[in-house]
Image (tube, grey):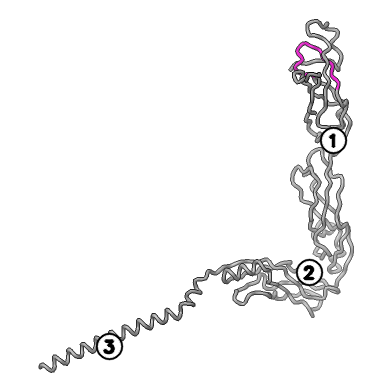
Amino acid sequence: MKKIGQSKIVNLVISLVIAILLSAYVLSTKTASLTSNGSDNFSTLIPEKKATLKVPLNLQFDSDNYVAVGAPTTVSVDIEGSGALISAAQSRNDIQASADLRGLKPGQHTVTVALRGVNASLTSTVTPQKITVTIAKKTTTTMPVRVTYDQSKIARGYTVSELVSDPKRVIISGPKTNVEAVDTVAAQVVLQQGIKDTITQAVRLVAYDKSGNVVEVNFDQRTVNVTMTITPADSKKLTLTPEIKNAGNNQYQVSFEPKSVTAYGASDILNAMSDISVPVDINQRQSNGNVNVTLPTITGIVRYDVKNVTAQVTQTTDGGAQSSSSSGASSASSSSH
């Protein structure tokens, strides 16, 4: 009986040792695995980034003899990967998109868009992946540029005195039917409301047929520089008439220097005027009797050739001593406001 008990104790001790050894082995294996995979786990902590780039689409074909119409000018490229690589792709513009049309006959074709310059560590997708393009024999002609704008945007009293397009003519090309359908090549200038100043603007060209529909053609240059010179619509020389203020019962003689000014503005306003009523405040007289007067603001008049005039004020009568018969001279008339 004693041997049997001792045998059980020995077995328990052996089992405990084996269990400890197995636990130590498993723990060391996990530690080694974590250690060996440390770099991989670190790499998974690098943040990934997504971005969408607009990339010009290059069409490869015999451009001397053929034209390709219907293709977009740019495509969207979605890229995904590490933030550093995404930032580099955005700043360096190395990604190129192209569609190979070489060897294709005239007609409509659907081709695949190919990408180049994408880092191998990035995932990329192009939209659209396929494009439909029409290849046709090339026809060219030269057309004048017609500049258009919204007249209602010009401030009242102003007009467009000169409109210059640089260049004045452009070359258009495309399928014969398209080129022959073009009636006008237009450059539509976009204006802000109430514009008064001369502007120069790069304007995109659009081709239209006789019905005002857009015609698909190619241009030797897509934009032109338009200079729009904006000036007052009309001008007129007007005499100055005094409107005396704060004269009380006294009478004054007023003369202006200069005696007349040139006003610039809307034709309908100027045509209805022969003179300008200029307020002269007697209380503003200087020691020499002069009053510096700012010309009045009048709707439709945008400016004068001078901003201020000098009014020479002379008192002709003292209020109480003047007879009623002497108060009729227009240049010496008085009013109190």
Whether residues under marks 2 and 1 lie with C-beta atoms below 8 angstroms apart, the answer is no
Task: Indicate which disc residue 286 carries.
Answer: none
In the depicted structure, whether residue 19 falls above or below residue 294: below
In the image, what residue type sits under mark 2? Val
The location of residue 296, given as percent across then percent down, is 78, 28
Q: Residue at x 86, y 21 (%)?
A: 255
Residue 39 drawn above or below residue 170: below
Q: Considering only order in the chain, which callout, 1 or 2, is on the residue closer to the N terminus? A: 2
Considering the numbered disc 1 on the image, is that residue within a helix, a strand or a loop? Answer: strand
Looking at the rendering, in which quadrant would you find the N terminus?
A: bottom left
Q: Write down the residue under mark 1.
A: 264
Amino acid type at circle 3 is: Ile
Amino acid identity at mark 1: Tyr
In the rendering, which numbered label is found on residue 69? 2
Q: Pick whichever, 186 or 55, lies toward us.
A: 55
Q: Secondary structure at mark 3?
A: helix
**Percent coordinates x, y for residue 97 in the rendering:** 70, 72
For disc 3, the marked residue is 18
The total of numbered circles placed on residues is: 3
Return the x and y of residue 214 as percentages of the image width and height.
79, 60
The question of residue 245 being in magenta is answered with yes
